[in-house]
Image: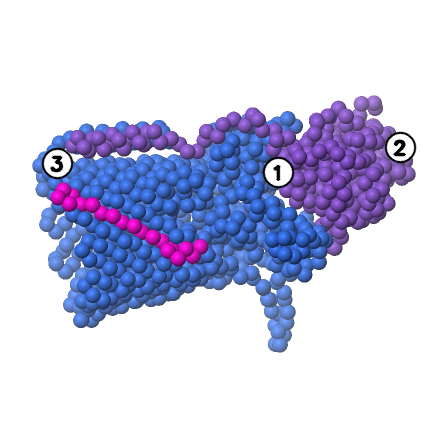
Chain colours: A purple, B blue
Amino acid sequence: MKKTLFALTAFAAALLITSCQDGGYGDMDHVSAETAYGNNEITEQNVVTLADVEKAFPEFNNSSYRGCSKAIEQDMKLRLRVTANDIGGNIYNYIACEDATSNDGKSVLIYVYSGGLFSYLPVGQEILVDLKGLSVGTNGNQQAISTPYMTSSGNTYPKNMPFWVWQKHFRIMGYNPEAVKTQEFTVDQFKNEVSKNIANLAGRVVTIKNAEITDADGEKKWAPKSDLASTNDFNVERAIVGLPKSTIFISTSTSAKFSNDVMPAGKVDITALVVRYGNKCQLTLRTANDVKPAVNR
Amino acid sequence: MKKKQTLVVALIALGQFAMAQKPYATDSIESAVDEEAQFTFTEAQLGEDDDMSQSVTILNSNSNAYASEVGYAFSPVRFRYRAFNQKYNDIYVNGMQLNDMESGQFRYSLVGGLNNQTRSVEFALPFEDNQFSLTAMGGSNNYNFRAGSMPSGHRVSIAGANRNYTARAMYTYNSGFNNNGWAFSGSLTYRWSNTKTAYVKGTFYNSLSYFFGVEKLLGTRHSLSFATWGNPTERASQAGCTDESYWLANSNFYNPYWGYQNGKIRNSRVVNDFAPSGLFTWDFKINDNAKLTTTLGGRYSMYKSTKLNYNNSDNPQPDYWKRLPSAFYDVWNPDNPRNAAQGTIFAPEFGQEVPRNWYSAYQYLAYSEANRQVNWDRLYASNKGANAAGADAMYFVQAKRIDVLNLQLNSVLNIDIDPKRHFTAGIGLGANNGRHYQSMEDLLGSSSFHNINTYAISKFGVNSPKVQYDLNNPNAVVREGDVFGYDYYINIHKANAWTAYTANHGRAHLFFGGKLGYTDMQRDGKMRHGLAENNSYGKSGIARFLEGTAKAAVSFNLGKGHALSLGGSFESRAPQASTAFAAPEMCNDFVTHLKNEMVTNVELSYQMSTSWLAMNASGYYTFITDGTEWQNYYYDDDNTFTYVSMTGVHKAAYGAELGARVKLTSFLDFEALGTISDAKYLNNNTARYMLSTEGTYKETTVYSKDMRESGTPLTATSLGLSFHMNGWYIDLAAKWYDRIYLSWSMPLRYETSLAAQGLINTGVDENGNITTNVDVPGQSLGKGGWMVDGSIGKNIYLKKGSLSFNLSLTNILNNVKICTGGYEQARQGYTTNNDGSMSGQRIYSFYNNPKKFYAYGTNGMFNVTYKF
């Protein structure tokens, strides 16, 4: 019996010192977007501007309706500042950035085949983008950076950059939200700018002051499925009073988090990303908070 | 976990104190050494992983050469007897049924580690009688947990393995009855592996099993026994992956569930499982010919299974389809013009130009283990970023939890009417109270999460009450440990009475049995779901079902060792509660047209038994109608999670089985086993599914006809030699497995989906009749193959006690290409317009990329046992 008790005691002791294996992974305070995302080996050498890239690659010229360069072989980098991301679910698999080097407001879309970009690319985040190995081009004259992609309808332009390719090609730099300045327009000014110089607006975040959404009656929502114009649409287009709907409209995805929020009626200030498609100006809200009651009614 | 272990050790210590009285030894019933191997093998590899859709059948027989071996012999590929759902295989302890009342299935983990207790078992094949129940269609087993029935003495064993666990230690002490009529039994088992030693990297196993039993003889006619046991287990899971992922990882055991966090392996899927059980048994020997056994028992099981989930982002699982090379290059159709757009790049390892994006994906995943695993750093970093932006946690670890209180009372009367006739009757009462809920385990550094249906926000707006998971507590903040998403009970009551009669008449042995039963079930919701405001909180209606079984068999002794048996049964069986509710995580609705399943089963067997040969050959046919099935999927066509039910399912299972044991010499046997079978759906059905983002139902025809039962080989054979001499046991067997179907996906075969792809075409035949041609995708198959298993053992009798060694080896030829099961992905290969019609084809093909599991390569266990 002594032996038995000894064996049992030893066995019990062995069990008691055996702890749960799940847990105890330590704190993660040291983790940040800078340490977890991107490629910190990218250096600020050969930094160029978007205008420089436009000169170097005809496919990236905003006069090109649709095109895609081959993978860039030169050592070229861009320092960009994020102006719009996917936080509201209205922007899908891309971000918009302005040139942080030139500060001329020139902007571009970067397509990444991944969601949740806003968590490490908030508005105001400056990034260094290594263009070597990526492609630049246009779709509907909208300039974009990504990798070549052919849609099921046969169009090729920069889109759907694999997640890991993106991770290899960017570096998180400083966070500077104050530097993001949206260009402000009245309704008439915006109408004129679109008709005269839509290329200058493409990819930029703008604010249209004192505007009124045509359909906003205090009940209508941004983008319910029932308001889709056709079966192959996924965005609902909303006109702005005083602007031609055929070329300027607020485009909201039915997948946006606020797609079933009621549109604010009356005079509002609308901040939106301009996504160009030919001569059309698709105003894309980042979140529902981009539309606020007008400050100067 | 530690608390559980402390409790258990204290309990066992208490048991030992009670056993301080000197027991008198009785002869213990020694088991063959290779039996140890069977237990260890089975427990290490099978039936414990609820995350895998399939499990094995517990089957044994003393008389049937096929049934006696097949359960163990084919267990490496998760063989199920006759491809039956495991709900047709009943497992009892002292007459109390252990099958889960909701699913009907037995979870092996309930008796995991209790090798020495489950060794004493009464078993019966479908048309055999037994002394504890009316035998189920897939066989019945009754473990004897009476302390006085355990072989007396001490038993210590230590084992090392390269399977799910790497080390095991067991100690068992059984006193036998002492002079005062007391018998005690106690046992402890500990099984262990860590994330680096387990067969599949990133998994671990940490399990303590305990057993304590006591029995008291009260005079010569009564005995009271009590047994309590449990198996607190913490283990990490392995994922099924596509062949593409296995290829990239250069291993069929690639497991994307884990990743490094601060240098330690962290698995996102950890199961904690503990079901403390106990029972009292009263055995009453009424007279020499009659015995009444009554058992009152219960268990409280706590099951928790974690999972990494996400919100407002992509699935972070590293083998998510968007990250795989074939998402960027149509490998199934290299001529796809979309392949050319990305351009090519020279790949030195392939010696040729390859598609640029495909190659970058290949390089990313093939050359870095870290890239193939969960990147916990990114999840934490994103959560910090999301919080800074005022958003809820983007990534989090949640847990599916099921807590079940089960109580049962069973009583069985056995009467030997005369030497040729036996009568058995029993009653059973059971209640099952199962709580199903979801809890937040780890917010991964985030400080914010809310109990709202984020998937429905885009449909209804964030301020809509429809997006609330619990309108009684709207916008509730969810912290770690809090319940969110769903919380409901399923309450079940069961009652049954059964009887069986056997008689020998001349050369005939007759068996008749019947059973009547009652089942009711009800859901009791604890959250008022926004999409089922008036139909989710509180109790549902009660669904009531009457059940019945009639069974008969006759065996003819044809003389000279030949016997022929014919059996038939008909069963009207209540649907399982696990399939009876349309969308239990959302509402109280029962599945429509819910009714009893009708099961007809016939079997013809021939048996030959001579001094040199034991052989059985059987043919069977099983016909099931009005079955109910339920599954949940992510459904692309509606971009939402769906709960799908089918009623009126008709199935058939049929096949032939052969088992033979040939005595070649006094020390060498040749054994052959084989089955060729089919088990398939006989009809197309109506699938009714609820969208988790709408709370409404949709219906469509699902082309289920000719789909096969999955996760078990429908063809399996084994040829082996068994050597036994002078205490040595050596077994070697070569096995062939084939026709292993994968679990088929309903959405891939929805009429609406097939129509959207143009796979349903109407025409006119030569007689002017309208014809409809439906091109239903074939069911995915896993690859079979040869597997060689063996074991060697030796019993050594010492002055005091005996020592035995056993080495069991499985898959000696290291054939890691045998698929043991898996499932088709439910997502579609096409994209849809907003009305569900097809808008285009994806590059990635879900249909061609089913998720699979493969048989472990060469693996073994070395075990040393000392009995004294």
- Residue on which disc 2 sits: A188
- The residue to which callout 3 is attached is B23
The percent position of residue B712, horizontal first and vertical second, equals 41, 57
Position in image of residue B813 (x %, y %): 39, 57
Tell me the mark number nearer the camera, choosing from 3 and 2. Answer: 3
- The residue under the point 56% across, 62% down is B776
| Separation (CA) of disc 3 from disc 2 | 102 Å
Q: Which of marks 3 and 1 is nearer the N terminus?
A: 3
Image quarter of the N terminus of chain B: top left
Q: Callout 2: residue from which chain?
A: A
Helix, strand or loop under label 1: loop
Mark yes or no: residue B549 visible: no
Name the residue tied to disc 1: B313
Is residue A81 at least partly visible in the picture? yes
| Three-letter code, disc 1 | Ser
| Element under disc 2 | helix
Same chain shared by disc 3 and disc 2:
no
Q: What stretch is highlighted in magenta?
A: B798-816
Amino acid, disc 2: Asp
